[in-house]
Amino acid sequence: MQYDAKTPEDYLDQLDSDWRRSKLLELRDLIISVAPELKESIHYKMLGYGDGTTFAFHLNAQSGYVSLYVGNISRIDPAGELLSGLNLGKGCVRFTKTKQVDEGRVGEFIDRAYQLWKAGEKMGC
């Protein structure tokens, strides 16, 4: 889904109070705890986390899942050990209603992605 939000607060206000909101907020808290200096803003009609010019993460609530966008997952986790058992695309992790954010090692994955982004490593697809 796309939200016509101008600010992160507006984006969060538009979310339905259901499992998607809970999962998105849990992922948001993980990102903020790992990288509190990242600015939260609206980018591509999603929540974006970066320095204002480049972005390390995006979050979006779709109709059937919540997405964490990170660029190319295999550049962050080449062995595929951190996100085992989760629904993955090339550059996103999808959390459905039945998948918990604390399944796998999502916090560790976010930290690794942030460290690579901060070092200026290419993370894109």
Image (spheres, rainbow, N blue to C red):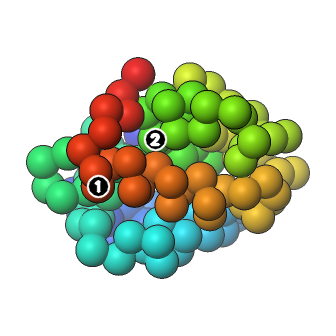
Residue 45, by quadrant, is: top left
- Number of marks in the image? 2
- Picture layout, residue 67 above or below residue 78: below
Rendered position, 16 above or below 33: above
Q: Which mark is residue 70?
A: 2
* Residue 50, above or below 92: below
Tell me the number on the disc at residue 118: 1
Residue at 55% across / 33% down in the picture?
73
Callout 1 amino acid:
Lys
Neighbour tally class for label 2: few under 14, some 14-19, many 20 plus, Cα within 10 Å:
many
- The correct choice, above or below, for 122 with respect to 24 in the image is above
Q: Which residue is outermost to the left?
A: 53
Tell me: 72 left or right of 39: right
69, 82: nearer the viewer: 82
Q: Position of residue 88 (x, y in %)?
A: 68, 31
**Quadrant of the image occupied by residue 120:** top left
Q: Name the element at disc 2.
A: loop
For the residues marked 1 and 2, what is the alpha-carbon distance in whole angstroms?
13 Å
| Res 88 seen here | yes
Pick the residue in front: 30 or 74: 74
For badge 2, the amino acid type reads Val
Residue 113 image position (x, y, % from top left)? 46, 49
